[in-house]
């Protein structure tokens, strides 16, 4: 079986699979979180931007109330949103209040940009023409300095980044007193982002992979090597895509609110042998060589974050 945990540069253990909550339907998040925690999951990934941390908190409380789940045994992730990148602790406090927690195990910079903290919307301020209200001239290193200060408060056990390209990491690291524990990125055979993965491995930064299946009904689930490997192991293509990450040393986030799917995602993980891994790598290498990357999550910020597939 794949490893159950990896070790962060803080020394803490992070589970190899977690439940993602982005775009989970309102009214179904709490039950999904509670069910997941009572059925093998120990990592819950959330964010202020998702506007569902109240429900995540309800799910946590419900799981704790059973007596089967203890706070110290689970790993909770949240992220500071772009409208709070100049007031990071305030953003964390809002998340903690919603979650009903005193601390999170990991707090991430969601995206390295600043949207107007005094704009016309708490999360997605817009200009008169309808475009995103982004503050120009912002330096993401300034936000990281505020993140580092959080560690002294005890409200976050570890800090990291999300959606950081190799370029942005190279801008950040020379100024970092604390090396990010994690970089959470979209990652799957259609978007291996190997240049980021390799740099993070070199620097001791753990990769968390979101959108591991690509998009609903997307090309990854029907990709020839994925289907072939699934048939070989007698599992669904989704199991192959979720299992792709453990050999790479990465944590994967599986997203669902359906009890059967939540359970299946964690129970159907398999060990990919060297031949399987080589086939998936060849598939990825071909896409990259032909510049046919498959990125499924890219908000319309109008900012060049330095990702090769977006140049």
Image: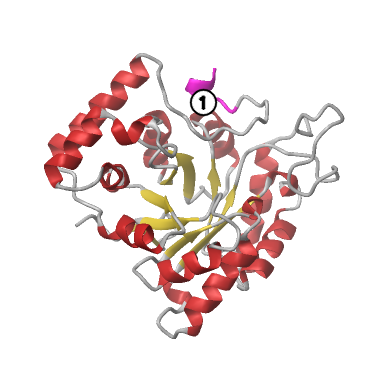
Q: Nearer the viewer, residue 64 or 139?
A: 64
Instruction: Please report the bounds of the magenta region as a residue range.
Output: 305-311
Q: Nearer the viewer, residue 242 or 309?
A: 242
**Residue 70 against residue 119 in the figure, above or below:** below
Left or right, 102 with respect to 189, comes to: right
Q: Is residue 149 left or right of residue 208?
A: right
Q: How many marks?
A: 1
Colouring convention used in this rendered image of the protein: secondary structure
Query: Is 307 inside the magenta-drawn segment?
Result: yes
Q: Is residue 86 above or below residue 168?
A: below
Residue topped by disc 1 = 307
**Along the horizontal axis of the image, is 165 left or right of 121?**
left
State the image coordinates of residue 280 (x, y, percent, origin top left).
Answer: 24, 32
Residue 189 visible (yes or no): no
Observer able to see residue 140: yes
From the top left corner, tell me how far across and down residue 141 is, in percent.
Answer: 65, 40
The quadrant in which residue 193 appears is top left
Q: Which residue does the image show at 38% across and 41% down from the upper left? A: 213
Q: Is residue 36 above or below residue 111?
A: below
Residue placed most toward the observer, 137 or 82: 82
Looking at the rendered image, the quarter that the N terminus falls into is bottom left
Q: Is residue 65 magenta?
A: no
């Amino acid at each position: 079986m794949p490893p159950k945990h990896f070790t962060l540069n803080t020394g803490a253990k992070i589970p190899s699979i977690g439940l993602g909550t982005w775009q989970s339907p309102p009214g179904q998040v709490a039950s999904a979180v509670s069910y997941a925690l009572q059925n093998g999951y120990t990592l819950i990934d959330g964010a202020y931007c998702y506007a569902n941390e109240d429900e995540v908190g309800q799910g946590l409380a419900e799981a704790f109330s059973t007596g089967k789940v203890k706070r110290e045994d689970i790993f909770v992730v949240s992220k500071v949103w772009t409208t709070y990148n100049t007031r990071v602790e305030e953003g964390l406090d809002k998340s903690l209040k919603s979650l009903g927690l005193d601390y999170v195990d990991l707090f991430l910079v969601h995206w390295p940009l600043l949207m107007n903290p005094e704009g016309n919307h708490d999360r997605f301020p817009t200009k008169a023409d309808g475009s995103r209200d982004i503050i120009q001239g912002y330096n993401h290193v300034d936000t990281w300095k505020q993140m580092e200060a959080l560690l002294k408060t005890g409200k976050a056990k570890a800090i990291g980044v999300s959606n950081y390209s190799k370029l942005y990491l190279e801008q950040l690291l020379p100024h970092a007193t604390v090396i990010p524990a994690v970089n959470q990125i979209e990652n799957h055979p259609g978007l291996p982002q190997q240049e980021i993965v390799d740099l993070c491995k070199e620097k001791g930064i753990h990769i968390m992979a979101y959108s591991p299946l690509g998009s609903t009904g997307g090309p990854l689930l029907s990709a020839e090597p994925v289907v072939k490997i699934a048939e070989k192991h007698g599992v669904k293509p989704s199991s192959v895509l979720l299992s792709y990450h453990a050999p790479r040393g990465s944590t994967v986030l599986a997203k669902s609110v359906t009890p059967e799917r939540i359970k299946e995602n964690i129970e159907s993980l398999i060990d990919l042998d060297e031949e399987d891994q080589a086939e998936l790598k060849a598939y990825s290498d071909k896409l990259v060589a032909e510049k046919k990357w498959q990125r499924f999550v890219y908000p319309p910020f109008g900012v060049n974050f330095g990702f090769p597939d977006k140049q």
